[in-house]
Amino acid sequence: STKKYNRLFPSLSLNYNFSKGATLQGSYSKRINRPSLNLIYPFNELTDLTTRFMGNPDLNPSYADVFEVGFLQNWASFTFNPSVYYQNNRDVIKEYTYRNSDDVFITLPVNIDRETRQGIELSLQYKPVKWLHMAAEVNAYRYAQRGFYNGQNFAYTDNTITGRMNTQVKLKNKLAIQAIYNFIGANATAQTRSAAIHSVDAGVSKSFLKDRLTLMFDASNIF
């Protein structure tokens, strides 16, 4: 098959400064989401005796038009940045599962017609002292998916939320500690439902020889 990927991806950003530290922001951008390599490999991945995942070499990238309006307020130790956005995504990549003649469930990624999102984002940063930095991000949105593949109707509408908290502490003698809490809310499609996911990552770093050498120890999903 022959595919053409020549496209323009324009973006426009406008800022208006109300006063010192306060800014109203508006933007538009066209974006592309290319499928990862494992999504296009045409080989079976054996999950268990009854379940397999197979890549789709005919998979197309998805394209999105994104509109966003936000407000940014900076104080000496605190940053407040809420925004609202709208996304219109085309050729969205979703997983399609079917059962073959051997009663084996096959899952493969496919392109469906579209997905629209309307959401609110909030970003906060707080640095009360030099040795402590805290940041948090929350994204709550409503999504509506539309499309068909091999007789399967992918129409589905729902709400979900994601979040992230990051704390970094810089101690004496070039010692630093960082912890990150990640949250992905429960979500669903026309075929699947996923429970909420919580995870915590943590790390410690120590610098030596006037910052020419740094040792780091990281732990992912420690719980």
Image (cartoon, helix red, strand yellow):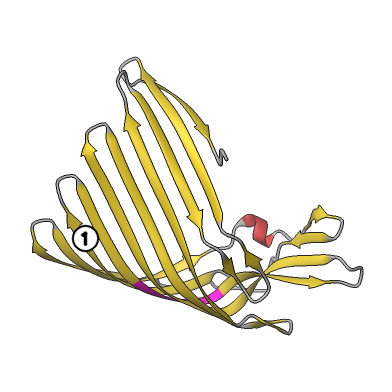
**Residue at the farthest right position:** 102
The residue that appears at 50% across and 43% down in the rendered structure is 200
217 part of magenta stretch: no
The amino acid type, in three-letter code, at marker 1 is Leu
**Residue at the farthest top position:** 209
Instruction: Tell me the quarter of the picture where residue 101 sits.
Output: bottom right
As drawn, 30 above or below 196: below
The residue that appears at 39% across and 30% down in the rendered structure is 177
* Left or right: 14 in relation to 93: left
Percent position of residue 154, x then y: 63, 80
Secondary structure mostly seen in the magenta stretch: strand
Looking at the rendering, in which quadrant would you find the N terminus?
A: bottom right
* Left or right: 210 in relation to 221: left
Element at label 1: strand
Residue 6 visible in the shown view: no
As drawn, 189 above or below 41: below
Residue holding disc 1: 72
Percent position of residue 49, x then y: 87, 56
Q: Which residues are magenta?
A: 85-91
The residue that appears at 16% across and 63% down in the rendered structure is 23
Residue 160 visible in the shown view: yes
